[in-house]
Image: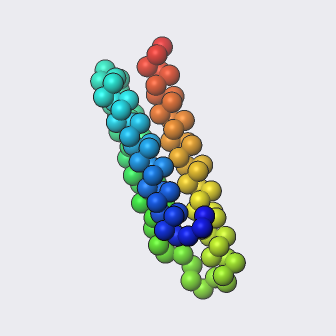
Amino acid sequence: MGSIRKLKKEIETRVYEVLSDCFTFSELNPDTKSDEISNIISDAVNFRNDLMHRVNNPDREADPKGIKAHYQLVNSDLVNGVDKLFNRLSSVSKKKKK
């Protein structure tokens, strides 16, 4: 990531994609279990809030290399977390097809 601003925008964009897909799926499939979709949405919002807190509150006593590593870890967690959320949504949609 080039800057904190870009990292924050990336967090917002990727989590919004998950939320958008969840809402779209629930609208197109009203007969599915909405509890599972609601749990994914809730987890996505909590995930976003946790990442934003970590971005806004880095460990200031760390050396500059530690700060850079902190933001790289947040970015890595973002990618992995969004992937897990999409996989959960995918598993719900596969259950629907059966």
Q: Quadrant of the N terminus?
A: bottom right
Closer-to-camera residue (36/17)? 17
Count of labels shown?
A: 0
Q: Residue most toward the right?
A: 65
- Percent across and percent down for residue 16 are 41, 48
Closer-to-camera residue (1/61)? 1
- Percent across and percent down for residue 6 are 51, 64
Q: Describe the colour scheme in one phrase.
A: rainbow
Whether residue 79 is situated above or below residue 7 in the rendered picture? above
Which quadrant of the structure image shows residue 41?
top left
Which quadrant of the structure image shows residue 32?
top left
- Percent across and percent down for residue 51 are 49, 61
Task: Identify the residue at image location x=34%, y=30%.
Answer: 26
Whether residue 64 is situated above or below residue 28 in the rendered picture? below
Task: Identify the residue at image location x=50%, y=57%.
Answer: 10
Task: Identify the residue at image location x=48%, y=68%.
Answer: 5
- Percent across and percent down for residue 66 are 67, 76
Task: Identify the residue at image location x=47%, y=63%.
Answer: 8
Residue 39 seen by the camera? no
Residue 60 seen by the camera? yes
